[in-house]
Image: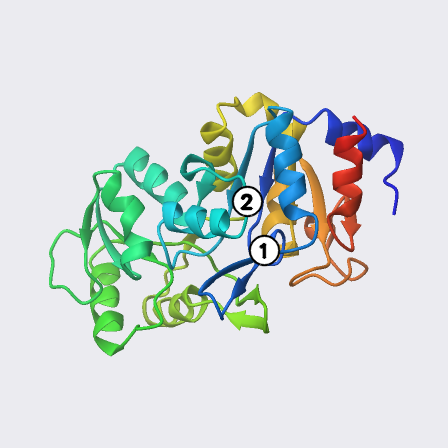
Amino acid sequence: MKLNTEIAARLRGAAGFIFDMDGTIALGDSKSGGHRALPHAIAVLETLKVADTPFVVFTNGTAKPPAAYAQSLRNAGFPVEDRQMLTPSSSAAIWLKKTGLTKVRVLGNAGCAAPLIDAGLEVVGPSEAAEGVQAVYTGWFREFDFGALEAGCHSLWNGARLVTASNVPFFATENGRAIGASYPINAMLTAMTRKRPRILGKPSRVAFETALGLMGLPRSEAKHMVVVGDDPALEMRMANDAGALSVGLATGVMSGDADLPEHSRPTCLLADLEPLLNTLRSG
């Protein structure tokens, strides 16, 4: 597949790239406990690195700290530094601190909480008794139990805001779709408290601007950005809302764009990363 002239020009002239991880450049490898690179993905990132074009990898997973995901990608052959890896907890930490919500109950595991702790926020455990909790943050937490539900509800009933890493039901793995943890947790909390979660990971503008900041790019470069991903509800919507170029991959959650709403439809949909690689190499 050859990309049309306009899209090719935007790709070659991009200010920076935001890549999803699972289903876009890699898939979880259960045998190694790490990741397996998808075709052409390593070459794409190596080409950007040689051209000195900024890029980040932004997973919507919060099971591990960003540095652990970066190491897993390096083990699979990717040229990704710790500073180029983002999770929703990265953008959540920045937003919470900026908003002044500094005491946060995290309904998530240690990897989910790590970026908040690193940012200097006061993190309260899932079932820990605590007064004055200002926000309840949900992420990867398959150990979620009734005690965590009760503690989260009490914090919300006492005035805490409900914020979340993600509110989509599925993500891509080597074995197909897997259920995201925060989606059902959010559903339970909303049913009990009537509070709806504010999303701080993809597809939020908070997440997009966190990625821009990490690359050292101003907000004015939003329309010159490229977002590459496999989930129309996440990467495609984030890109379209910001006016960036949305490149969809049919290698994960998304298989077609015919029935997608306009705000979630990719600018172009690729079967794999080869057309992107060829375009970047021809620039």
Residue 220, image quadrant = top right
Question: Does the CB distance between marks 2 and 1 fall below 8 Å?
Answer: yes
User: Is there any visible trace of residue 209 in the rendered image?
Assistant: yes
Q: Earlier in the sequence, mark 2 or mark 1?
A: 1
Residue 138, image quadrant = bottom left
- Classify 172 as above or below 225: below
Q: Nearer the viewer, residue 222 or 78?
A: 78
Q: Tell me residue 215's x, y (percent).
A: 50, 28
- Classify 270 as above or below 244: below
Relative to 24, 211 lies left or right:
left
Relative to 279, 225 lies left or right:
left
Mark 1: which secondary structure?
strand
Instruction: Specify the quadrant that holds the C terminus.
Output: top right
Q: Tell me residue 223's x, y (percent).
A: 66, 28
Residue 17, image quadrant = top right
Q: Tell me residue 198's x, y (percent).
A: 42, 51
Give the residue type that dot 2 points to.
Phe
- Classify 249 as above or below 205: below
- Classify 14 as above or below 175: above
Residue at 74% of width from left, 32% of height from top? Answer: 11
Q: Tell me residue 242's x, y (percent).
A: 61, 36
Q: Nearer the viewer, residue 194 or 92?
A: 92
Mark 2: which secondary structure?
loop
Relative to 89, 211 lies left or right:
right
Query: On residue 78, which mark appears?
Result: 2
2 vs 1, front mark: 2
User: Is there any visible trace of residue 240 in the rendered image?
Assistant: no
Q: Nearer the viewer, residue 179 or 11?
A: 11
- The residue singled out by tag 1 in the image is 26
Query: On residue 51, which mark appears?
Result: none
